[in-house]
Every structure is written in C-alpha cells, then in structure tokens.
C-alpha cells in the first residue's frame, strides 16, 4: 500500500507556479475583454475623443469630419 506524504511548499513557489499556469490564459482573456469593451464603447463621444482619436493608425478613422452646420446640437 502506498503512503501519502505531506510536502510543504513555500508561498513564493506556490505563487510562481500559479502565475505560470494562469498567466497566459488570463492575459488572453484580458486582451479579449479589453478589445470587446473598446469595440462596444467606440460609439460614445468620451471614448471616441479621449482614446480612439489619439491612437496613431486609427485616429483618422474616428475623427469627426461632420461640418458644424450639419450637427443638430
């Protein structure tokens, strides 16, 4: 019959093992959630003016080129 032996591990080793296992997965989910949030919030003026216009390659796409005479408010 096999004997079960308890082998204590240090908290630092436990944390590094946990980070190695879950780090890439949480990173991929974080990038996906951030992309979805930017995509869904891109129609709001605060996100459009404050964030998306300042992105170097995408800034021209999100600039408001509507003349002032055509804006209702």
Image (spheres, grey):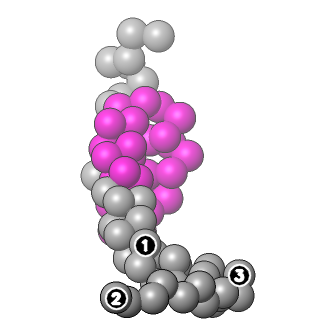
Q: Residue furthest top?
A: 72
Look at the image and say whether residue 54 sits in the magenta stretch: yes
Is residue 11 left or right of 1 when viewed as pictured?
right
Q: How far is disc 3 from disc 2 in space, using C-alphas?
A: 31 Å
Disc with the residue nearer the chain's start (2 vs 1): 2
Disc with the residue nearer the chain's start (1 vs 3): 3
Magenta residue span: 33-58
Q: Position of residue 3 (x, y in %)?
A: 45, 88
Look at the image and say whether residue 39 sits in the magenta stretch: yes
Q: Residue furthest front?
A: 1
* Callout 1: SS: helix
Q: Which residue is mark 3?
A: 11
- Are circles 2 and 1 on residues that touch, CB within 8 Å? no
Q: To which quarter of the image does residue 10 belong?
A: bottom right
Q: Position of residue 64 (x, y in %)?
A: 37, 38
Q: Which mark is residue 50?
A: none
Q: Which residue is mark 1?
A: 22
Nearest the eye: 22 or 53: 22
Q: Position of residue 46 (x, y in %)?
A: 53, 35
- Are circles 1 and 3 on residues that touch, CB within 8 Å? no
Is residue 37 left or right of 46 when viewed as pictured?
left
Report the residue at 44% width, 41% height from top. Answer: 48
Report the residue at 47% width, 31% height from top. Answer: 45
Q: Which residue is mark 2?
A: 1
* Callout 3: SS: helix
């Amino acid at each position: 019959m096999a004997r079960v032996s308890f082998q204590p591990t240090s908290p630092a080793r436990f944390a590094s093992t946990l980070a190695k296992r879950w780090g890439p997965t949480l990173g991929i989910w974080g990038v996906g959630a951030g992309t979805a949030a930017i995509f869904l919030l891109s129609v709001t003026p605060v996100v459009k003016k404050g964030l998306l216009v300042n992105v170097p390659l995408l800034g021209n796409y999100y600039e408001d080129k509507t003349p002032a005479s055509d804006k209702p408010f």
